[in-house]
Image (spheres, rainbow, N blue to C red):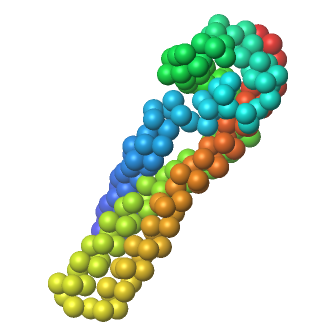
Amino acid sequence: MPLLTSFGLSAALTFVLTQLNRVLSKEIFQRWYFKEEEYMPTTNLLLWSNNKFEHSIKEKLRMKIRDHYGIELHNEIDEVNEEISSRKRIVFAVSQIRNNLRDNALLFNHNVEYGFFRNFLGGCVMAILFSILIVAYSYFFPDVVLRNIGITLVIIYSIPILLSRVILKVYGNNYAKILFEQFLSLPKP
């Protein structure tokens, strides 16, 4: 019975820490960099001002969004004059596209990839906090080896955080491209 209790506590602690990583990563990195999805790569790629997709591809995507969901995205002039409103419309349209492609295996793989790295960054925040605690502990109970380990860990876990914007943009762009490619391959409604 003690083994079962120990396993249950370990599983519960793992679950709580995993959820904490997820919340931290969404609140700190995704919300901070992408401002409630309004600046996510999926949103940015559909803006007329973004040149990653050709104009004709954007037109096809916008027509397909209109045909599938009845959502009319802003034209180039309205987008410039009402950028926030344009972004919000795109965010809503992208949510509909994601719902439509929920069972798409290729998109799922890219979503898992993006989610892994986003959650990894949340884990790095927690790891830095624990590493700082190790350093603090090494000062109260003098231990140079433990202090050096703590400092090394702080440096190691800080590197992904320093690169976090690049990491999330790369994996976010990969996801966005696959999302729109798969959306364009859907049959007409």
Corner quadrant of residue 49: top right
Please name the residue shown 27% across and 73% down the image: 133
Q: Residue visible at 74% across and 36% down?
A: 52
Q: Vertically, is 71 above or below 138?
A: above
Q: Nearer the viewer, residue 39 or 185?
A: 39
- Which percent across, then down, holds residue 98? 63, 27
Residue at screen point 64% across, 9% down = 72
- Looking at this view, name the residue that lies furthest to the left: 140
Residue beneath the point at 36% across and 79% down: 150
Q: Position of residue 112 (x, y in %)?
A: 61, 46
Please name whichever residue, 44 or 153, is drawn nearer the observer in this view of the structure.
44
Residue 60 in the image: state x and y as whole percent.
79, 19
Quarter of the rendering occupied by the N terminus: bottom left
The total of numbered circles placed on residues is: 0
Task: Describe residue 115's horizontal placement relative to residue 131 as left or right.
Answer: right
Q: Is residue 55 left or right of residue 156?
A: right
Which one is nearer the viewer's eye here, 17 or 1? Answer: 17
Rendering quarter of residue 131: bottom left
Quarter of the image with the C terminus is top right
Viewer can see residue 187: yes
In the image, residue 143 sits, relative to residue 160, either above or below, namely: below
Image location of residue 164, percent across then percent down: 52, 55
> Is residue 179 among the parts visible in the rendering?
no
**In the displayed structure, would residue 81 be above or below residue 101?**
above
